[in-house]
Amino acid sequence: MAQSGQVATVNFEGEIFESEDHRNWSDASYKTYCTPISLPFPAQVTPGEVLSQKITISISGEHTTAISKNESAVITVGAEEIELPEIGLGLSEDPAHLIVSEYAGFDDIAIKHLRLSLNGDSQIRSAVEKALLVTKQLKIDLDLAIKAESPQQLKAILQSIIEFKDQIRSFYIFSASEKTTPIGFIQAAEELLGDKSKIIGGTDLYFTELNRNQSAVDFVDQVNFSINPQVHSFDDRTLIQNTASQKAIATNAHRIAKGKKVSIGPITLRPRYNPNATQPNKDLSNTALPSSVDARQRTWFAEGWTAMSIRSIAESESISTLTYFETLGWRGIRELSTGSEDALNFASKAGEEFPVWRLFKNLKGFTHARPTASSLPELVDCLIVTSGQKVKVILVNFSTIEQEVKFSGIDLKPQTLTPESVTYLEITGVANV
């Protein structure tokens, strides 16, 4: 029964239907389908066989809830202060992304690490050497994520950079063929790196892989999974809704990790690749851009979405480290000095700071967040960060019209937000209500 007083009835006929909780992929939705995943995939259909399925949806009862079109959003603010996870960025192995001069100004934003992702085809040693120059200039940590085909290949990769191991904070170890890190990979890493290096495993795919193989956490120092909000759909409303699920899966990942720290990364707008594609070469984008690139990366929407992502994950009080996007280029927070790779479909200017850069800059120096809840979260939402007596209120108007927002639990006058915008308010010594 809905809050409106109406009742929806759904009848399924002609097949075995199965429902899937998309929160496992950080999506705030469910899917019902046939045939069940437990049966052979793809399902075989013989010539002449007739398939017949029917779904009937009926609604009964009288609608009783009036909806006001002029209703103001109310942000309710909790008094608790929650420690923010450490925030960092992904680092592409592309040589253009590993030039120290590209990173002027990055010390002005709230990042504490870069994560360099490599595989067996990478120019391993060169990429690590250049990445260390960048992180040393910025005075932040370098984490290294390695995806290998086998323990033997992993050993070869690690052996090529063994002299740098004490300059690398953490080693993320993943398998190219299995969705969670096998114990043999961890044993190979431990054999070469020793006890002093932090070895992180789990998955560089979705939370669902940890949920399916919870024993993968038993033999690592820290647990990882990745997030993107477009596994199942890609419209703006879906992405907004999906930030709420990040709190739920962060909480459950903490439970699965059995007291070990949990990191989330990479966190991206688009899937980096499709791990379930039966024909990867034909798994093309639904836009003119590559499938891993979203044109919204250089808009206010990525800025607002990221603020809500940080808010939701922080409220889980379960995650130690977050790694967002990349540093540079069309999957990053600032364009390369050489400009866009596709100026027609991603019309950024050389060196352009994307709006999400402003978010990371405004988070600099803030250590905690206060829990917030919006009465109209698909229209207006909020991240509040604190550091001592300093308070910064970050308001997102996801709607296409002007919105008024009121506050409860904090002494702050109503605010009027322009359409499709992120607003920053810095205040000192604000009182609770």
Image (cartoon, rainbow, N blue to C red):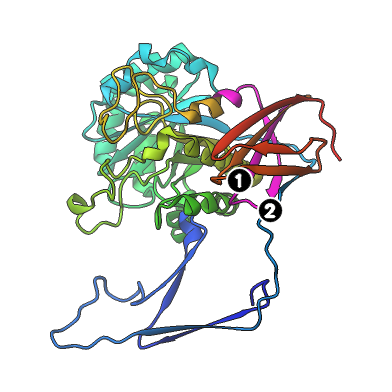
Q: Mark 2 points at which residue?
A: 70
Question: What is the x, y in percent for residue 216?
Answer: 45, 52
Left or right: residue 334 versus residue 23 is: left
* Residue 318, visible in the rendered structure: no
Q: Looking at the image, which residue is at 79% across and 35% down?
A: 412
Q: What's the magenta region? A: 361-387
Residue 400 coordinates in the image, percent (x, y): 54, 45
Q: Residue 332 carries which label?
A: none
Could you give the CA–CA distance between mark 1 and mark 2, rounded to whole angstroms?
27 Å
Decide: is 97 above or below 122.
above
* Dot 2 amino acid type: Asn
Q: Are marks 1 and 2 in contact (CB under 8 Å)?
A: no
Q: In which quarter of the image is residue 12?
A: bottom left
Q: Where is residue 11 in the image (x, y as percent from the top left)?
A: 47, 86
User: How many dots with numbers?
Assistant: 2
Quarter of the N terminus within the rendering: bottom right
Identify residue for label 1: 312
Residue 309 vertical placement versus 169 (above, below): below
Q: What is the three-letter code of the residue carrying label 1?
A: Ser
Looking at the image, which is closer to me, 172 or 33?
Answer: 33
> Which of the 4 image quarters holds residue 416?
top right
Say which residue appears at 37% left-offset and 15% top-offset.
102
| Foreground of the two, 213 or 63 | 63
